[in-house]
Amino acid sequence: MKSVRDAEAIILNLVQPLDKERDIEVVDLLNANNRILANSVISPLDFPHWDNSAMDGFAVRYEDVQNSSAEHPTVLEIVEEIPAGYQPQSIIQIGQAARIFTGAVMPKGADTVVMQERTKREENRVFILAAPKPQEFVRHKAAFYQAGTELLSAGIRLNAPEIAVLAAAQCPQVSVFRRPVVAILSTGDELVTPEQPLQPGQIVDSNQYALAALVRECGAEALLLGIVKDEPVALQDAIAYAMANADVIISSGGVSVGEYDYVEQILASLNATVHIRAVEMRPGKPLTVATFPDPHSVLYFGLPGNPAAVLVTFWRFVRSAIKKLSGVAGGWEAEFLKVIAHSELRSDGKRETYIWGKLLLIDGVYEFSPAGGSQSSGNLINLAQTNALAVLPVGKTLICSGEEVEVLPVR
Ligand code: AMP
Ligand code: MG
């Protein structure tokens, strides 16, 4: 049985990220949100593109105005008006200024902008009422970014700020990693779909739905293979199909040691290498992780059947694996927060225990409140509205209300 930490390291080590030449596609910038940048972007443009004004005011020669004050203002001749978007026509000479607006190109000869609040205008003359600092309110060409250097690095997730940068750099299309394909199958003779009439003893295949949502949340494509009977041939066919059509396979159910649990047997017949058979955690102990032989380096997760165990093991391990596979450059490991326990948290201390519940913001401090009702891995109902899992390490049986606890945010 592997510790949770070892299992995470083994899994991340098994993941082969998508190939940055073969596994890419070009998307319009408007469809690039949440995609992973495949190649670094270098712009031929400087930012700012030219020296420009940071204020509405007057472009001046610092030398001319350095001794200005309200009592002894400097008087300059206004030789031009430069709104944003216009190319200045004149070169500012001794005793001259240009009316300038925010973002407008600085005229040659001028090196400083005096904000309009520190001036007084009379027709084509301006009175400078206070001495500016040298080069004040000028944004210099290339001060924010130099053409030819790296603008955005490969492996970052594109969201609003990055998309704005790409738009500004005139990249209307962008090269991103394709979405990884994750096959999802549910095993069990007792399972029916939500549409089928429920006979005594049957259970609805909720895991398929939960996993589809989780996979899509990770930016991957879900390949839904439905319910597979507890029959070796059916299961072998489904896994073989998934192997040929997906980057990752997730099955739920059938991995414990019950008589009808065939997964291990099927994996052996498909020449899979099993890396993990059980993890020292609750829920989620019977987690199986395997890889299939080349040419496809397909990663297989056999999740336990219990719906709570499916969610917890996905959040703890599968999410990180999909992140690495997707081409994200680093930081794949699950990230924990230290918060305050809102009420006491208990475990038998035998395995690393994951308690589902909510992060609450109370007077500006995050507190974790466990879901009411049973924390049994068979209970799905009180998982609704979970946004975090609290973690009790092996050996820890109690965290009192008000004490610090580590949580894994899941939404
Ligand atoms: P198993 O791991 O196959 O022994 O399943 C453990 C428990 O999870 C059993 O109570 C199953 O009925 C339940 N279960 C298995 N698969 C699913 C599924 N796809 N959706 C909901 N519950 C399931
Ligand atoms: Mg089963």
Image: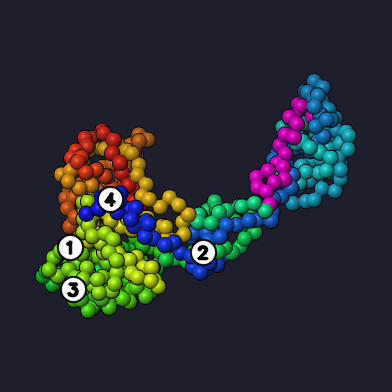
The image shows residue 160, relative to residue 76, as above or below, that is below
Q: Residue at x 48, y 54 (%)?
A: 329
State whether label 4 is within 8 Å of ligand 1.
Answer: no
Which dot, 3 or 1, sits closer to the camera?
1
User: Marks 3/4: CA distance?
Assistant: 28 Å
Marks 2 and 1 sit apart, C-alpha to C-alpha, by 38 Å
* Residue 230 image label: 3
Magenta span: 128-147
What amino acid does circle 1 point to?
Ser
Q: Please tell me which of labels 1 and 4 falls first in the chain.
A: 4
Residue 185, visible in the rendered structure: no
Instruction: In the rendered structure, find residue 256 and report the number of the disc placed on it.
Output: 1
Q: Which callout, 2 or 4, points at the residue further toward the start of the chain?
A: 4
Q: Earlier in the sequence, mark 3 or mark 1?
A: 3
Label 4 environment density (alpha carbons within 10 Å; few <14, some 14–19, many ≥20): some
Judge: label 1 CB < 8 Å from ligand 1. yes
**Upstream in sequence: badge 3 or badge 4:** 4
Counting residues from the start of the chain, the first of labels 3 and 2 encountered is 2
Say if 216 sits above or below 90 in the image: below
**Residue behind label 3 places its C-beta within 8 angstroms of ligand 2:** yes
| Residue at x 29% of width, y 69% of height | 272
Q: Is residue 142 above or below residue 228?
A: above
Q: Which residue is mark 4?
A: 4
What distance separates the C-alpha of mark 2 from that of mark 4?
30 Å
